Image (spheres, rainbow, N blue to C red):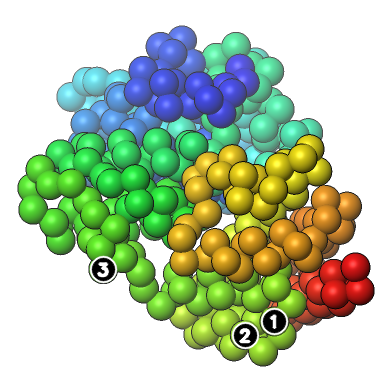
Amino acid sequence: MKIAARQVEAFVRAPNPEVRAILVYGPDQGAISERAVLLCKSVVDDMRDTFRVVELTPKRLKDDPALLSDEAAAIAFGGGRRVIRIRGAGNDIADRFVDFFDHPGGDALIVVEAGELQARAKLRTCFEKANIAAALPCYVDEGVGLESTIRQMLSEAGLTVDPAALDYLSSNLGGDRQVTRRELEKIVLYVEPGARVSLQDAEACVGDGAATSMDDVTIATAGGDYVTLDTALRRCQANGDAAVMIVRAVQRYFHRLHLAAGAMQSGMNANAAMATLRPPVFYKTQDAFRRQLGIWRPATLSTAMEILTETELDCKSTDLPDWAILGRSLMRVAQAARQGTSSGRKR
């Protein structure tokens, strides 16, 4: 069965007891791992219990056609339902699940973790079509969903958050669920128990050089600032950031520019258009964002977003160095921003 993104959290909290196999997939590896563990713990409390928890590699499944059915039917020493966990799955083992869904045996829960899968990917479609299986997408937290995630994680620690701090955290987190959780854990340790997280608390804990460098990349790209862009990209690479993570951050920024530019076309001024965005534009970047709304138009933003989408695909599917692909593409987009600046002066 196919689980909609909005239904994933509820499913993870209370999995359908008739579902025997669950595929957790998508671009957010942190969310995939976190949800997979929660699903496993719905059956086995202790993930270190070697009698009830078994991990299989995709290679072993591929090499042994009977392995999945054998493990699913195995009985745990001492009793209790078993969990089978498979990480790094891909379409090359889809046939093993097609066969298993045709002739399921035993009562083990099978939890499969995969990366991004296209809508027609064989592994994904076989889980979506089977009555005893479920496919759960894990998309990157953003917008209102990210704000909700931040509030929830802080609430679990007994903390509340000021609106300004929430805006700051929403602007600097969200690329990976586990990274978001680790950053929020810093805040939990930093502030007093039961406190209200202030903007100063958020900046002290999360305002690190890596986040700043990534912000510099997005703002410099949208503003046509070659020198700052080159420097910020070098810093991100030195920080160990993944090229795909950078391009996704730029994509999110341009998506917000596109939304605001569309609002301006309907008659709003720049300030009113920016006020419609959720999360709000962080106060330190509002001036740059406002200037960029004067540079870009919806049509040119659409072209820039197409370039960024192609860049992400090229980073993941070609043998060329991903940082070279990223740098070349962002410079192309920055060049378009410069052309927009020149056009604006002529107008």
In the image shown, does 195 or 347 lie closer to the viewer? 347
Q: Judging from the image, what secondary structure is the residue with disc 1 in?
A: loop
Figure quadrant of residue 248:
bottom right
Residue 101 image point, x, y percent: 61, 19
First along the sequence among labels 1 and 3:
3
Q: Residue at x 18, y 42 (%)?
A: 159
Residue 55: tell me if it is visible. Answer: no
Q: Residue at x 15, y 61 (%)?
A: 190
- Name the residue that disc number 2 marks: 228
In the image shown, does 229 or 34 lie closer to the viewer? 229
First along the sequence among labels 3 and 2:
3
Q: Are marks 1 and 2 in contact (CB under 8 Å)?
A: yes
In the visual, does 226 lie left or right of 31? Answer: right
The disc at residue 204 is: 3
In the visual, does 262 lie left or right of 281? Answer: right
Distance from disc 1 to disc 2, alpha carbons, whole Å, reads 6 Å
Instruction: Give the farthest residue toward the left.
Output: 193
